[in-house]
Image (tube, rainbow, N blue to C red):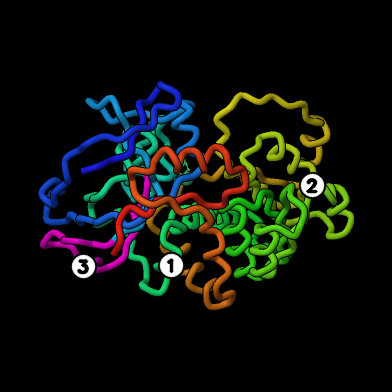
Amino acid sequence: MKAVAVTPGTPNSVHMEEIAKPTLEQIPDGMGVLVRVLKVGVDATDREINDALYGNAPDGDDFLVIGHESFGVVEAVGENCKRVKPGDYVTATVRRPGGSIYDLIGHNDMTSEEVYYERGINLRHGYMTEYIVEEEEYIVRVPEGLKHLHVLMEPMSCAAKAVSQAYEAQQRMKVWRPKTAYVLGAGQIGLLTTLVLKLRGLEVYTLARGQAPNLKAEIAAGIEANYVSTQEKSMDDLVKETGKPDLIVDATGSSRLAFESMQHLGHNGVVVWTGITGGDDRVEVPADSINLNWVLGNKLLLGSVNANRTHFEMGIRDLALGEMMYPGVLEKILTHPVDGLDNYQEMMRLLVEVKDALKVFVNVAAE
Ligand code: BGC
Ligand code: ZN
């Protein structure tokens, strides 16, 4: 069967591989799920893997099948599977366990080992192919009523984790009633994080460069957030209007903005960084001032990567609620479809050239 792959270490190596169709027997104890892939989303991670900034092939292979945002339909299950059945719509988690205690309890996203295993990213093949097989543990059911949001499940799981981590960490405060949040960046993670925070009842300001009207502003407004163009209003000026936010989530992919955001956080607040910055940008920051304010304000800086099964389930619940609250808004994120795995060059071109493509995804197969 066909699979879209890269040769790790070689820039711009995206190509087609012919690989064997996986079988249920590859998974022990009757716990396998065979999924027919319907759609796969791509994001900046795939672009940077194709730029050879990171990404490694599984042991014994010289190519890495890419794609970590999956959506498919169950074709067959092993005899001991309980959670899904043929015909169910599903997505799959991305990270696979290493050997740390966190991996042993299903929190692969929190591994304490330096090496991590991620399907489509590091040391494990991804989902940009026709069929995948996985342990039921890593397969998450997608409600039929959300199938039109298909490849958003994985990015949503990362947004759900980022916010839930902030709330968990803030248990240090005994009482934490955040009122105002800034979300930096209105790409897919920024917009989905905006939704998660709105559903938790916060006043959300979603900041991005572009001036309204544009699609990002339209989606942010559609979920009742305040869209702010940083070309029109600096973060300093916004703080003068809103007061310092209790929570800032950076989803810009720019380390410069991630650091800059630290100057605007309120006392006892949290900044969550979600951007994976593969470059080597260096910036000057007002280090004394940040240090001083950070200490005097008991502030917290939190990094958040990936998501485990629980976060997928949280994210899916929020998508369902979001769809009830704001019908028809979320699907506007799914901007750039590409038809068929054969069009992988077009997929990469969109990812590289269309700067404001909210979501490039491949229609792998029809239902
Ligand atoms: C993926 C995450 C992954 C991270 C780091 C992101 O694009 O969505 O699942 O953990 O990259 O590799
Ligand atoms: Zn991703």
| Disc on the earlier residue, 1 or 2 | 1
In screen coordinates, is 327 left or right of 243?
left
- Residue 191 is situated, as x and y percent measured from the top left of the image, at 61, 57
**Quadrant of residue 194 within the rendered picture:** bottom right
Q: Quadrant of the C terminus?
A: bottom left
The residues colored magenta run 73-94
Residue 117 visible in the snapshot = yes
Secondary structure beneath dot 2 equals helix
| Disc on the earlier residue, 2 or 3 | 3
Q: CA distance from mark 2 to mark 3?
A: 49 Å
Q: Name the residue that disc number 1 marks.
A: 148
Farthest top residue in view: 10
- Residue 7 is situated, as x and y percent measured from the top left of the image, at 35, 26
Magenta run includes residue 55: no
* Nearer mark to the viewer, of 2 and 3: 3
* Nearer mark to the viewer, of 1 and 2: 1
Q: Name the residue that disc number 2 marks.
A: 264
Secondary structure beneath dot 1 equals helix
Rendered residue at 10%/62% (across/down): 79
What amino acid is at disc 3? Lys
Rendered residue at 61%/53% (across/down): 190
Q: CA distance from mark 1 to mark 2?
A: 37 Å
Q: Name the residue that disc number 3 marks.
A: 85
Q: Quadrant of the N terminus?
A: top left
| Disc on the earlier residue, 3 or 1 | 3
